[in-house]
Amino acid sequence: MKLKSNHIGLVIAIMLACLFDVKRLWAAQPPRTIADAFLDEELTYAIGFWVFDDVAIGKVTFKRADDGDYVATLEAYTTGVVDWVLRNRRDTYRVHMRMSADGKRFISKTFEKSIEMGGKTRRGLTVFDYEKRLMTWRSWGGGKDERSGVEKLPPNIHIDDPITAFYNFRYGVYGPPVEGREYTIYSFPKGDETPHIYLRVATRPELEARRGVNLSADYLAFARIDKDLFGSQSGDVEVLFTSEMLPNEAVARDILFFGDVRGRLVKIGVGMDFKTTAAPPAPRISAPR
């Protein structure tokens, strides 16, 4: 995906927020498919950046699409005085996906992106054609030139957009979490290269050193993604989880214009059978730079 945006960055933190084997939470009555696990789920996050807390809202929802497949939507928008300063900023990412034949993973169909600010909207669309092994993309609007292209999907590997990867992670598609374990997820191809999302589950001592006053956090994951994809100078993300494996706090590092962007889970809708444990109101992840 050759779209660049210095957006408010929560999308990065959220999409990497769930490195765990959720199956162990469903031992009593496991869902039949990955879709059963997430249908109608809604997660809401309070977002902060610069010296401000709670100046934006992020929401992630999962619904059944009109065609019988599924659609996941991530929205992030500024509020209050910061909304005026940033000229009514709203970022929307929407993915249409289908289940694999065995119901054990999601497969991307389309990835849509919309960035609204100051009355202008920049849009992007990526379409995956698995029969032809091609990915076509186009971006337009927002006072910028229209761009488009076609990339080959490499054989014998899965290509996951960030939001599809978010749900696949949560279902345990990429394997269970192990302290110190590393994960590689292939993302949008670029020419002869196939960029990937790199993740590592922290050791217990690393968690204890990082979680601060967020005592409900029991797990920590480090991630690094393609810097161009979401307008980050480093691509680094850190995420804290509760014992129920809910991502209740995250930091996306070095987002252009915004710096470090903090997300804190404040509301959980229906969906997976988690305890509704949100993050405390003030904690932040402090990492040595």
Image: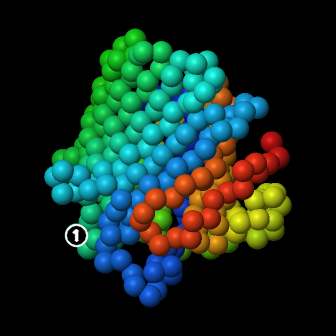
Coordinates of residue 178 in the picture (x, y in percent): 62, 73
Residue 207 appears left or right of 7: right
Residue at image location 66% in from the left, 43% down from the top = 262
Coordinates of residue 116 in the picture (x, y in percent): 43, 24
Instruction: Note whether 8 is above or below 44 in the view shown.
Output: above
Which structural element holds mark 1? loop
Residue at image location 56% in from the left, 70% down from the top = 275
Furthest residue to the bottom? 28
The foreground one among 183 and 231 is: 231
Instruction: Note whether 107 is above or below 275 in the view shown.
Output: above
Q: Amino acid at mark 1?
A: Ala
Residue at image location 51% in from the left, 25% down from the top = 89
Q: Is residue 226 visible?
A: no
Question: Which image quarter is the N terminus in?
Answer: top left
Residue 109 appears left or right of 14: left
The foreground one among 188 and 68 is: 68
For label 1, the residue is: 101
